[in-house]
Amino acid sequence: ADVEAGLWIALEQRQFVLHYQPQVAADGAVLGVEALVRWHHPVRGLVPPGEFIPLAEECGLILPLGRWVLEAACAQLAAWADDPWRSRLVIAVNVSARQFLHEDFVAGVVAALERSGADPGRLDLELTESSLVTDVDKVSEKMEALKALGVGFSLDDFGTGYSSLAYLKRLPLDQLKIDRSFVRDILVDPNDAAIARMIIVLADNLGLRVIAEGVECEEQRDFLARNGCSSYQGYLFSAPQPIDALEAFLDARR
Ligand code: G
Ligand code: G
Ligand code: MN
Ligand code: NA
């Protein structure tokens, strides 16, 4: 309960920050970044999301926190809009199931886009399977409403949840993300290699893009590339970084 109270105070006192991890094409070109929230705790220092997102989901803070993340990401897109190179980047934002399923979700995204003036075509929302396994008509209605504005959708942590392949064809997704648990041992575990290849083929047949996360070495990247993967994210390219470091990283590649 102490941590929960601390989280509400953190939101009020603006102690959350976004770090950004590049997403790159096979040739190394930066396509965009994933926004990953951290809690800048006055005593504990930088707290990773694994230590507070589950709690925020439980206590309901994920709604205002998720809203803040969207606003901050859209503000960053707007700040990049005048730069000929940075303006082509996409920002991917993680959306919790509880946040996505809330009745105000679509209105909240629209408000964040309008208030910032960000190009909706530069916003990608990363949903998890748990967001999708409920009422498929309601889910696709929400996705279609945002998709009509140009917002993109990725399915995060694909293969780790309770997916039914049936909804993959019913929902307007743009991309599957291969979970890093399959990438980690891809070179030594034939099962992980088979699953990763299966996801790439599935995405291809459904007309979806595919991005592998947790890519840590060139051999993993090359294996994925040989099997048709189009985009990559992971420590091989860059860890998540604060905005200043990210912009320096981007400028070195423009
Ligand atoms: O940044 P890190 O690698 O520690 O992220 C751990 C997990 O926290 C990731 O799986 C990611 O999905 C989740 N996460 C990070 N930022 C956000 C966010 O803004 N909203 C939600 N809902 N989850 C996030
Ligand atoms: O949304 P998601 O749960 O996938 O969040 C990505 C998480 O993975 C973040 O916590 C991020 O810090 C972490 N991460 C990013 N790249 C790598 C990587 O190459 N290896 C490992 N082990 N973790 C990574
Ligand atoms: Mn993610
Ligand atoms: Na993930």
Image (cartoon, grey):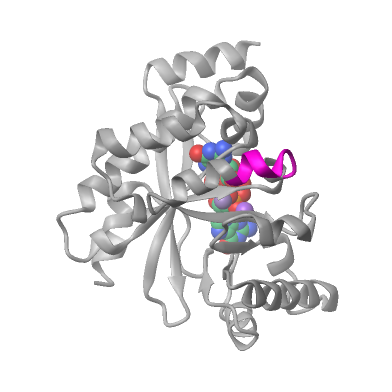
Mark yes or no: residue 48 visible: no
So how many labels did they put on this image? Answer: 0
**In-front residue for pair 206/72:** 206
Q: Is residue 185 magenta?
A: no
Residue depicted at 48% across the width and 36% down the height: 38
The location of residue 129, given as percent across then percent down, is: 70, 48
Q: Is residue 137 magenta?
A: yes
Residue depicted at 36% across the width and 42% down the height: 73
Horizontal side of 4 relative to 147 (left or right) equals: right
The location of residue 179, given as percent across then percent down, is: 67, 60
Horizontal side of 160 relative to 74 (left or right) equals: right
Q: Going by the picture, which residue comes out furthest to the bottom?
A: 226
Where, by quadrant of the figure, is residue 76 drawn? top left
40 relative to 149, above or below: above
Horizontal side of 218 relative to 107 (left or right) equals: right
Mark yes or no: residue 19 visible: yes
Residue depicted at 73% across the width and 66% down the height: 182
Residue depicted at 37% across the width and 75% down the height: 29
Which quarter of the rendering shows the N terminus? top right
Q: Going by the picture, which residue comes out furthest to the left?
A: 82
The location of residue 78, given as percent across then percent down, is: 23, 46
Name the magenta segment's main secondary structure: helix
The location of residue 220, given as percent across then percent down, is: 63, 78
Task: Please state the extent of the stretch shown in magenta in the rendering.
Answer: 133-140
**In-front residue for pair 103/85:** 103
231 relative to 179, above or below: below
Where, by quadrant of the figure, is residue 68 drawn? top left
Quadrant of the image where one finds ligand 1: top right
